[in-house]
Image (spheres, grey):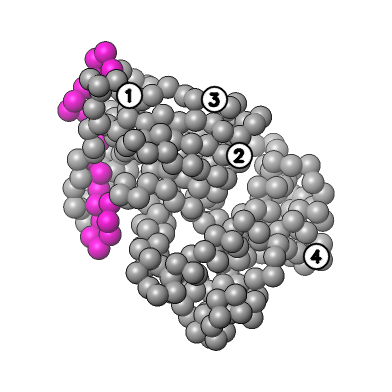
């Protein structure tokens, strides 16, 4: 990075939730080929979620590797360079926003700093929630199924711009931020407990292989714990019991496979851990309100 360039970390403000009023400046899905993007700084905040493939962000003299299902929280004033690693492409959800409806964004120049004519007073302020660390402290997150669904809804609302879309986007963004704060809290709690890191490892393994045997009995055996004790600790860290956590992971992966592959519905069910097609269809419809075939058809229309 050239010596004359410097990071300007976002100003932070401890602020009660009633003062938060996030405005959305940009929300879109993108498919990008392998390669490095430009080195840049932002005036606003960006959530960059990898929905398919893998990516990398160079920031603060560190390298952050991102796989499908992870997002990075990018702050104003910080030089960063995104890189698409997977071949032939990677797919993203990108959401630009501020916390206090403070920026007047008319185009890209109001979000991305033009280094020839920077505007030092324009950088957005990060809201810091009572009882939580700033979201930017640890910028990598693995949002659950519901949070990803909220991001997809936000992209749809922002693209359609129906009457009242600003209010809907604001509400969705508040909900997304709440989920990230809870994920941060669970991660901190996991690191602070004796068994937390081991349970966090199991959660990661469940993400990587949702079709494996993750019954309470199996988890308890892997962790060398009593089933009831394991379930209690797991819920305290993940925010939900093991079975419910696994169901969310399986549903999220099923949605991805239905959107992005031509696998049969039966094979999608097998890939996420359901041997019986009819049972998979019932479970999927209970979560989504649509059958797997209906969901695939709708996703391809949109």
Is residue 144 among what the camera can see?
A: yes
Q: Which residues are magenta?
A: 115-134
Q: Can you give x and y, in whole percent of width and height, for residue 114 in the image?
A: 30, 18
Gap between marks 1 and 4, in whole Å?
Answer: 52 Å
| Rendered residue at 56%/72% (across/down) | 242
Residue tagged 2: 53
Secondary element at tag 2: loop
Looking at the picture, tell me which residue is in the foreground, 28 or 64.
64
Select label 2 or label 3 by which is in front.
3
Gap between marks 3 and 4, in whole Å?
Answer: 39 Å
Circle nearer the N terminus (3, 4)? 3
Look at the numbered discs 2 and 1 and tell me whether their residues touch, using CB distance below 8 Å. Answer: no
Which of the 4 quarters of the picture holds residue 196? Answer: bottom left
Secondary element at tag 1: loop
Residue tagged 1: 1
Select label 1 or label 4 by which is in front.
1
Look at the numbered discs 1 and 4 and tell me whether their residues touch, using CB distance below 8 Å. Answer: no
Is residue 96 among what the camera can see?
A: no
Residue tagged 3: 35
Secondary element at tag 3: strand
Secondary element at tag 4: loop
Which of the 4 quarters of the picture holds residue 220? Answer: bottom right
Circle nearer the N terminus (2, 1)? 1
Gap between marks 2 and 3, in whole Å?
Answer: 13 Å
């Amino acid at each position: 990075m050239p010596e004359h360039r410097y990071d300007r970390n976002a100003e932070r403000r401890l602020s009660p939730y009633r003062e938060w009023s996030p405005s959305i400046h940009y929300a879109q899905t993108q498919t990008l080929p392998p390669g490095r993007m430009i080195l840049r700084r932002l005036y606003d905040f960006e959530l960059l979620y990898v929905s398919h493939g893998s990516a990398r962000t160079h920031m603060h003299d560190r390298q952050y590797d991102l796989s499908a299902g992870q997002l990075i929280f990018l702050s104003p004033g910080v030089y960063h360079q995104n890189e698409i690693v997977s071949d032939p492409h990677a797919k993203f959800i990108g959401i630009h926003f501020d916390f206090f409806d403070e920026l007047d964004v008319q185009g890209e120049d109001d979000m991305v700093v033009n280094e020839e004519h920077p505007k030092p007073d324009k950088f957005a302020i990060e809201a810091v929630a009572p009882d939580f660390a700033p979201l930017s402290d640890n910028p990598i997150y693995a949002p659950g199924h519901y949070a990803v669904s909220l991001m997809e809804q936000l992209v749809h609302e922002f693209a359609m711009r129906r009457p009242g879309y600003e209010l809907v986007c604001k509400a969705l963004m508040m909900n997304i931020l709440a989920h990230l704060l809870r994920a941060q809290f669970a991660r901190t709690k996991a690191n602070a407990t004796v068994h937390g890191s081991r349970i966090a490892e199991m959660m990661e393994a469940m993400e990587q292989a949702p079709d494996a045997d993750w019954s309470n009995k199996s988890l308890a055996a892997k962790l060398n714990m009593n089933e009831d004790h394991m379930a209690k600790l797991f819920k305290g860290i993940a925010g939900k019991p093991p079975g419910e956590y696994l169901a969310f992971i399986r549903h999220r992966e099923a949605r991805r496979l239905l959107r992005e592959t031509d696998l049969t519905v039966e094979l999608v069910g097998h890939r996420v851990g359901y041997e019986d097609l009819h049972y998979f269809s019932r479970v999927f419809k209970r979560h989504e309100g649509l059958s797997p075939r209906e969901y695939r058809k709708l996703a391809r229309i949109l």
